[in-house]
Amino acid sequence: MRHAALLGLCAMLAGCGGEDAQPEPETFPEKDWPAEAEALLAGDDWYRHAVFYEVYVRSFQDSDGDGIGDLKGLTSRLDYLKELGVDAIWLMPIMPTPFKDSGYDISDYQGINPDYGSMAEFEALLAAAHERKLRVIMDLVLNHTSDQHAWFSESRKDKTNPKADWYVWSDTPSDPNNGCGTANPTFGDSAWQLDPARGQYYFHRFYPEQPDLNYRSPAVVDATLDVARFWLDKGVDGFRCDVIGMLYESATECDLIPETRDYVKKLRKVVDEYPGRVMVAEPSKLTDASGYLGNGSDMFHMAFHFGYGYFWGFPFGSQNATGIVETFQKSLASYPSGAQDALVIGSHDVQRAFSVAQGDDTKHQRAALIQLTAQGTPFVYYGEELALRPGSQQIVDQRDKARTPMLWDASAGHGFTTGKPWLAFGAEAELFNVEAEQAAPDSMLSFYKALLTLRRGRAIWGTGQMEILDTGTTSVFALYRADDFMAYVAAVNMTEEARVAELARPGLGSRAGRVSGSGQLTLTSAGGTLSLPANGAAIFRVR
């Protein structure tokens, strides 16, 4: 299979094919990179050097032919993830749910969705992953529950039951002490829903079937911290915390108010009781995650960098790097020491990278190159490594278009199921699947594998110094990455025409050896002259 749209960009990486690829110069010192990777991923700071992979269990691998992905199916695909270069897996919600919000409406915090299997099968998944030195983190959805949760069933009975104050109730569809509750919710027209049984309105930030918990009740604080302990005791390696900034509301503020920060610090103390476990925040403020990181060690280990991850389509669409420069400069300036970016170019909540790139695989690759070379921890959404196409069927909401089943081969069920898939496959499934792309040196899968190989064992990518280089043009974005052992320049041409940029940064390195991509870098005392082809990108080792 050939990908004409790639325009040779897969030659960006040594070993990915193409006449333009060049190995690292022999004059640069090397290490035993597999051994370095093992050491970096063994300590408590493993997450800084890891690559995470977001999995929607329902859409990843069906093991029993019912058309729904499950835990046994995921377990059977762990070797694929290991070969890809992944170090950790983030599981979207796997707890019991009425499925009004694709599992983000949880009806039992200490169970497993029977569609996905049993607790024993989850424990087997954990054991198999850990045997392969793959970590597993879970979605922790604490802002709200399902209206089918036992807690809400009791709370709605009357105003005097033991859980009467576990949710946010009001006699009217508003609350002067809860200014956020007067605004429209994320889904629907009203944030308040009348409950006939109790004769009051309950607050819901999201769907009406997702009532918000009341964290001003000490019992709710204790119960939710116990949920975290339950899964940590099972052996999970941490949590991705869903809409965590919205736990408390006040008359004037909706996001990450002081009470929410205090709760996060309590949660962090619980997680810290288990060595090597981590937390990553989903910020509600899409362009500023700094508040979630505390002093660098008392709140979240990582926060998603949505300023780049959810908006990269705009600068690439305008062929202007200004927005990318500004968002990374902001994080460099505002993050506390010890904080870590979690870097994405897609997720279950937004369009697939293929869609954002408007079908231009070179644009997808250039966006991924920035994600994978900027300082931080990459999170790859399942199927992104295939340029998985969106679907058209909608069962829950429009986000289903980016949640179609994983494509493993060109068979009728595409290796995902022997039955009818719960959600229709995305477009061009017979061409863009794992089996087809593994056989193609110029495929998106080959591109991702090569980039992840270049990252592996090299501490510089996760924790090395990062500078946004002055290129003298908005048409070229360039990063300088350095640590005590080595240094790289990573550069992307935002445009469809060849570009030359002057890098104004003395002391970049001793010489420029291209380790990926197309283009040239000539170092000078003032910095260097960088030449990139149309739609081009490159990584140069300079020390």
Image (cartoon, rainbow, N blue to C red):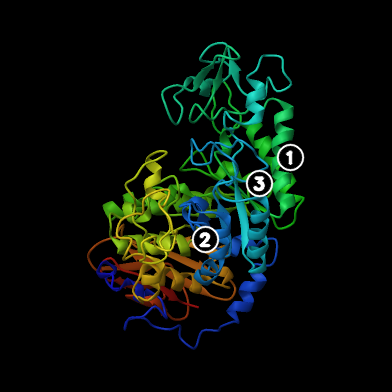
* Label located before the other in sequence (2 or 3): 3
Side of 18 relative to 191 (left or right): left
The residue pinned by badge 2 equals 375
- Give the distance between the C-alpha atoms of the residues marked 3 and 1, in whole angstroms: 25 Å
Residue 381 is left or right of residue 126, and the answer is left
Lower sequence index among marks 2 and 1: 1
Q: Secondary structure at mark 3?
A: loop
Q: State the separation of the CA atoms marked 2 and 3.
A: 19 Å
* Residue 526 visible in this rendered orientation of the protein: no
Q: Nearer the viewer, residue 439 or 507?
A: 439
Q: Is residue 197 above or below residue 328?
A: above
| Residue located at (63% from left, 34% from top) | 260
Camera-near label (3 vs 1) is: 1
Measured as percent of width and height from the top left, residue 506 is found at: 45, 70
Label 1 SS: helix
Which quadrant, please, contains the N terminus? bottom left
Given the image, on which type of amino acid does mark 1 rest?
Answer: Asp
Which quadrant of the view contains residue 522? bottom left
Vertical placement of 395 versus 465: above or below? Answer: above
Q: Which residue was labeled with disc 3?
A: 295
Q: Earlier in the sequence, mark 3 or mark 1?
A: 1
At label 2, which amino acid type do we have? Answer: Gln
Badge 1 is on which residue? 226
Dot in front, 2 or 1: 1
As shown in the figure, which amino acid type bears the numbered disc 3? Answer: Asn
Mark pair 2, 1: CA separation: 33 Å
> Which residue occupies the extreme left position in the image?
497
